[in-house]
Amino acid sequence: MKKELHPKNYRPVIFLDNSSKTRFLINSTVNTKEKATWDDGKEYPLYTVEISSASHPFYTGNETVIDTAGRVEKFKARATKSGAKKAASKK
């Protein structure tokens, strides 16, 4: 491997999928504040993600709605409001 190819903070990091609670140990440069213990007993930086290959519908084949920020409800409210405006303008 070439020297000085990777950044200085390139290290193993635990990625935790919030929706499926699956964990992955992958080398990364992501900045983290938390730490967790892996299966080997060592402590690694922990980074949480909302969706990964363990929970994404493309990989799992399961259609699920993951909405932690309330975006779906906001979209539905806007769509309903917009539909009401269009109906009122046609009259």
Image (cartoon, rainbow, N blue to C red):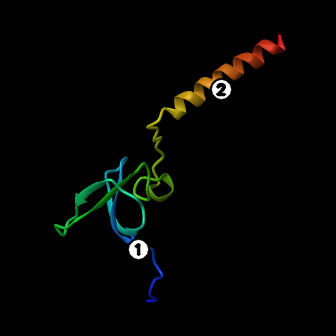
Q: Nearer the viewer, residue 27 or 52?
A: 27
Q: Nearer the viewer, residue 10 or 57?
A: 10
Left or right of 80, for residue 49:
left
For label 2, the residue is: 79
Q: Could you say whether the residue bearing mark 2 is in a helix, strand or loop? A: helix
Label 1, label 2: how far apart the Cα atoms are: 48 Å
> As displayed, is residue 1 above or below residue 58?
below
> As displayed, is residue 80 above or below residue 55?
above
Quadrant of image for the C terminus: top right
User: Residue at (81%, 14%) from the top-left corner?
Assistant: 89
Expressed as whole percent of the image width and height from the top left, the position of residue 8 reads 40, 73
Quadrant of image for the N terminus: bottom left
> As displayed, is residue 83 above or below residue 44?
above
Left or right of 38, for residue 14:
right
| Other-residue count near label 2 (Cα within 10 Å), few / some / many at <14 / 14–19 / ≥20 | few
| Other-residue count near label 1 (Cα within 10 Å), few / some / many at <14 / 14–19 / ≥20 | few
Name the front one of labels 1 and 2: 1
Disc with the residue nearer the chain's start (1 vs 2):
1
Q: Amino acid at mark 1?
A: Lys
Expressed as whole percent of the image width and height from the top left, the position of residue 80 reads 64, 22
Expressed as whole percent of the image width and height from the top left, the position of residue 90 reads 83, 15
> As displayed, is residue 85 above or below residue 19?
above
Expressed as whole percent of the image width and height from the top left, the position of residue 14 reads 32, 62
Q: Amino acid at mark 2?
A: Ala
User: Residue at (34%, 65%) from the top-left corner?
Assistant: 13
User: Residue at (46%, 43%) from the top-left corner?
Assistant: 64
For label 1, the residue is: 8
Q: Could you say whether the residue bearing mark 1 is in a helix, strand or loop? A: loop
User: Residue at (42%, 61%) from the top-left corner?
Assistant: 30
Identity of the residue furthest to the left in this view: 41
